[in-house]
Image (tube, grey):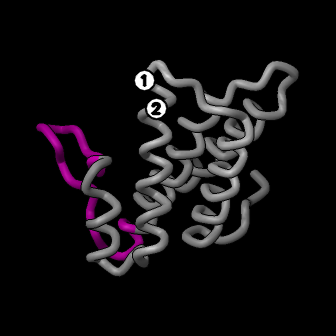
């Protein structure tokens, strides 16, 4: 999951830096960067990825921030950050509202800090 976290951060950056920015897609990628970083941290803390249906394993999005706080993987501030990024992703992916480049730049900054806090500095692949 670590590589997916960094790849999603890189994709979010690219989506904001292109000539015609794509803030909705970037917001989605920023959230998934944080989500995958949290998933990695949960596994590193000894919490196995749950089986959500036979043969399918992942952490459910809604309970993950609370579960990570309860496990000691996230503090309350980081849990709020993950929830906020998730809320932006829902707007970006499912609602008619358009996110602004400025708002998504802030989301990307928050996601970058979140990922770095859980995984360390960005590796050079």
Secondary structure at badge 1 equals: loop
State the residue at coordinates (60%, 55%): 111
Q: How many marks?
A: 2
- Considering every residue shown, the one lying at the far right of the view is 19
**In this picture, is 78 found above or below 20?**
below
On screen, residue 19 above or below 52: above
Q: Is 46 left or right of 10, judged from the image as shown? A: left
Q: Pinpoint residue 25: horizontal percent, then vertical percent.
A: 60, 28
Q: Nearer the viewer, residue 97 or 5?
A: 97
Judge left or right: residue 34 versus residue 11: left
Q: Which residue is mark 1?
A: 95
Are the two marked residues, 1 and 2, in contact with CB atoms closer than 8 angstroms? yes
Residue 3, given in percent of the width and then of the height, sits at 59, 50
What is the x, y in percent for residue 56? 22, 38
Q: Real-space Cα distance between discs 1 and 2?
A: 5 Å
Q: Is residue 50 magenta?
A: yes
Residue at point 32%, 47% (across, down): 61
The magenta stretch spans residue 95:
no
Q: Secondary structure at mark 2?
A: helix
Q: For the point 69% across and 25% down, which residue is it?
A: 22
Give me the disc on residue 91.
Answer: 2
Magenta extent: 42-60
User: Would you place residue 42 above or below residue 9 in this image?
Assistant: below
Q: Quadrant of residue 8?
A: top right
């Amino acid at each position: 999951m670590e590589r997916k976290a960094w790849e999603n951060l890189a994709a979010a950056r690219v989506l904001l830096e292109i000539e015609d920015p794509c803030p909705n897609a970037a917001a989605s990628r920023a959230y998934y960067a944080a989500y995958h970083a949290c998933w990695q941290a949960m596994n590193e803390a000894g919490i196995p990825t749950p089986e959500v249906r036979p043969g399918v394993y992942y952490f459910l999005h809604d309970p993950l921030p609370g579960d990570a706080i309860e496990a000691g993987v996230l503090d309350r501030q980081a849990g709020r950050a993950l929830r906020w990024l998730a809320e932006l992703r829902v707007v970006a992916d499912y609602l008619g509202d358009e996110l602004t480049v400025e708002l998504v730049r802030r989301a990307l900054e928050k996601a970058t800090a979140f990922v770095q806090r859980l995984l360390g500095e960005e590796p050079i692949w």
